[in-house]
Amino acid sequence: MASKNIDLKINGVRDGKQLSPELLDVDEVVNLLSYARDFLFPEKSKSRARVSVALKEGSAVISLQVDSATAVKSQALLNQLNTEHNLGMLTTKQMDAIEGLQKYVREQNFVLHFGEAEKRAEGLRIDRETEWRSPEDIWIDEERYVKGEIVDIGGKTKSNIHIVTEEFDTLTVAADKETLSEDDKNRLYKEHQLSIRLKRNLHTGEYKKGSAELIEFIDFEEKEESPEAYLDRLIAEAQPFMDKIEDPDKWLKHIRGYGG
């Protein structure tokens, strides 16, 4: 099986000397290897190929020989991570590994390069000043349906709907006054289904409190639409907009908060 080297190269000064492998403590090497392994192989697999390790000169280099597929995939992720500094694109295990490397670099005042041996400049660079975008700060808009009893509609300063649902308990849904004033149905204390938009945390999956907004009331009987037909109609209405998107992958990354 073809293989490539993924390196952790550490630059710095210790004991008045430029860092070299013999100046690293065994615990440092073990911890750094653990971080590298968890980043490269975030999912446990008994079937993964053996990873050999070597310590090399050139400051201090810890080199891991991995299969080509792992090297290529990891290099691409490290490059993107270096550009965007967005921890939200990582698994929990990978995120912990990067945070471990960051802590080590900050404490020792080192500079670390993580990437393919021949393409380290295109991989990840970490120093004590490196800052990261926390997954908790990354929210995406999500549209969904909620069903329940409406217990309040309106409001003097903020117009909204209070609906009691199984998933959210009592959910406050913002709605503009025009929409509510033009609605001719008596919806109070009755079961209804709403189409809403709200913000969801990209990493934790949690919904942001107070972010729900009304898209529309779903009145299937009046529209003579089944839920499936309603969804088909929404897709058809969105299609002209989607057709204008030249690069769907780039657009989706932007919507998810990855930049680009």
Image (tube, helix red, strand yellow):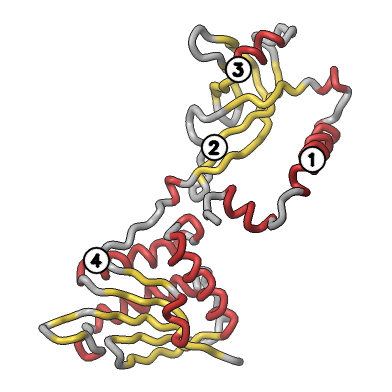
Callout 1, which amino acid? Ile
Residue 192 position by quadrant: top right
Which residue, given by chain and number where applicable, does mark 4 sit on? 106
Where's residue 83, x and y in %?
46, 64
- Whole-angstrom CA distance, mark 1 to mark 3, is 24 Å
- Whole-angstrom CA distance, mark 3 to mark 2, is 18 Å
Residue count near mark 2 (Cα–Cα under 10 Å), binned few <14, some 14–19, many ≥20: many
Which residue, given by chain and number where applicable, does mark 2 sit on? 199
Camera sees residue 53: yes
Does 148 appear above or below 198? above
| Precedes in sequence: disc 3 or disc 2 | 3
Residue at (75%, 46%) from the top-left corner? Answer: 242
Q: Are marks 2 and 4 in contact (CB under 8 Å)?
A: no
Residue at (85%, 21%) from the top-left corner? Answer: 223
The residue closer to the viewer here, 141 or 48, is 141
Callout 2, which amino acid? Lys
The residue closer to the viewer here, 219 or 85, is 85
| Precedes in sequence: disc 2 or disc 1 | 2
Does 107 appear above or below 249? below
